[in-house]
Amino acid sequence: MNLLQRCWLGLACGVAALSAHAQTGPEAAPLAQDPVVEARLVVLSQELRCLVCQNESLASSQAELADDLRREVRDLIRQGKSDPEVKDFLVSRYGDFVLYRPEVKPLTWVLWFGPFVLLLVALVLLGRYVQERRLQIKPQTLSDEERARAEQLLKG
């Protein structure tokens, strides 16, 4: 999927979410008849990312894929799977991206520490640049003639 398609998909998802939010509120409408299953689904779906909308939780997404994932999570809950087992199943199927807060492990170090490393590199490069600029700029002393001319310009 190219960048333009992703942008359009994200825009369509955002518009769908806004219209659904105006109609039903911020959370997706529950489909399960069992309140225990539904309560677990709500908690789990807030910790999972919509694979289409990417900046929304599974709980707040109105995308069709989000409905399918919620249905799948309901089925896993009904099968007696624990919350960690449900998350492990989704991670094995969709990768760590499906989690809003992926585990800190070697595969996700870039997600957790990458921004800090980039910030540190940027600060080091900025420091070097400022230091080099200071060395390039040499203080200039004015001759007596230039100083007299500057005083004349300032006085009048």
Image (tube, rainbow, N blue to C red):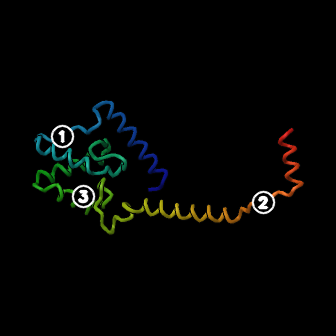
**Marked residue nearer the N-terminal end (2 or 3):** 3
**Marked residue nearer the N-terminal end (2 or 1):** 1
Mark 2 to mark 1: distance in Å? 77 Å
Q: Where is residue 55 shown, x and y percent of the image?
A: 37, 48
Mark 1 to mark 3: distance in Å? 20 Å
Q: Is residue 153 left or right of residue 11?
A: right
Check the picture and name the quadrant holding the C terminus: top right
Disc 2 marks a residue whose amino acid type is Gln
Q: Is residue 50 left or right of residue 83?
A: right
Toward the bottom, the furthest residue is: 106
Q: Where is residue 108 shown, x and y percent of the image?
A: 34, 64
Name the quadrant containing residue 109: bottom left
Q: Residue at x 35, y 38 (%)?
A: 17
The residue lying toward the viewer, choosing from 140 and 77, is 140
Check the picture and name the quadrant holding the N terminus: bottom left
Which label lies toward us, 1 or 3? 3
Q: Where is residue 114 shown, x and y percent of the image?
A: 42, 62
Disc 1 marks a residue whose amino acid type is Leu
Q: Residue at x 39, y 64 (%)?
A: 110
Q: Residue at x 48, y 53 (%)?
A: 3
Disc 3 marks a residue whose amino acid type is Leu
Q: Is residue 129 left or right of residue 112?
A: right
The residue to which callout 2 is attached is 140
**Depicted 62 relative to depicted 125: above or below:** above
Which label lies toward us, 2 or 1? 2
Mark 3, other Cα within 10 Å: few <14 / some 14–19 / many ≥20? some
**Marked residue nearer the N-terminal end (1 or 3):** 1
**Depicted 111 relative to depicted 18: above or below:** below
Residue 90: image tag: 3
The residue to which callout 1 is attached is 31
**Depicted 131 relative to depicted 15: above or below:** below
